[in-house]
Image (tube, rainbow, N blue to C red):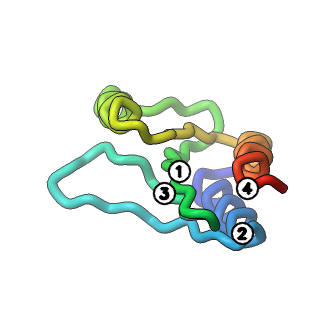
Amino acid sequence: MKEKGIEEYLRTEVKKLGGKAYKWVSPGNNGVPDRLVCLPKGIKLLVELKAPGKKPTKLQVKRQNELTRLGNHVFNIDSKHLVDEFIKSCKVLLGL
């Protein structure tokens, strides 16, 4: 499965939880995660999506570290299985 398919699957599964997975583009700030996931209860998570087996670039890792130091949660996902694991974590946060 390509990155686009994984991204579509993520959006669909997040929507089932009543949330949105917004495409995040931040002009002048290359390397930010692909998606800002907004869930009920004000929960916000960041997701970097990759094709299976691909890893974040050095710049993406730098941005993820910056965001993590600021108290954000950043997830790297490269498969439908990891989307499913992410959704399980979301359900725990939502108390489902």
Residue 61 vertical position relative to residue 80 in the rendered view, above or below = above
| Mark toward the start of the polypeptide (3 vs 2) | 2
| Mark toward the start of the polypeptide (1 vs 4) | 1
Where residue 75 appears, x then y in whole percent?
56, 39
| Mark toward the start of the polypeptide (3 vs 4) | 3
Query: Which residue is tagged 1?
Result: 45
Name the quarter where the C terminus is drawn: bottom right
Q: CA distance from mark 1 to mark 4?
A: 13 Å
The three-letter code of the residue at mark 1 reads: Leu
Which numbered disc, 3 or 4, marks the residue closer to the eye? 4
Query: Which residue is tagged 4?
Result: 94
Locate residue 82: give its quadrant. top right
Q: Which mark is residue 80?
A: none
Which numbered disc, 1 or 3, marks the residue closer to the eye? 1
In this rendering, position of residue 40 left or right of residue 50: right
Q: Residue furthest right?
A: 96
| Mark toward the start of the polypeptide (1 vs 2) | 2
Q: CA distance from mark 4 to mark 2?
A: 17 Å
Q: CA distance from mark 1 to mark 2?
A: 16 Å
Report the label total: 4
Q: Nearer the viewer, residue 25 or 50?
A: 25
The three-letter code of the residue at mark 4 reads: Leu
Evaluate whether residue 19 shows in this view.
yes
Q: Nearer the viewer, residue 53 or 88?
A: 88
Query: Which residue is tagged 2?
Result: 12
Label 2 neighbour load within 10 Å: few <14, some 14-19, many 20+: some
Q: Residue at x 40, y 33 (%)?
A: 68
Q: Which mark is residue 35?
A: 3
Locate residue 42: give its quadrant. bottom right
In this rendering, position of residue 28 left or right of residue 17: left
| Mark toward the start of the polypeptide (1 vs 3) | 3
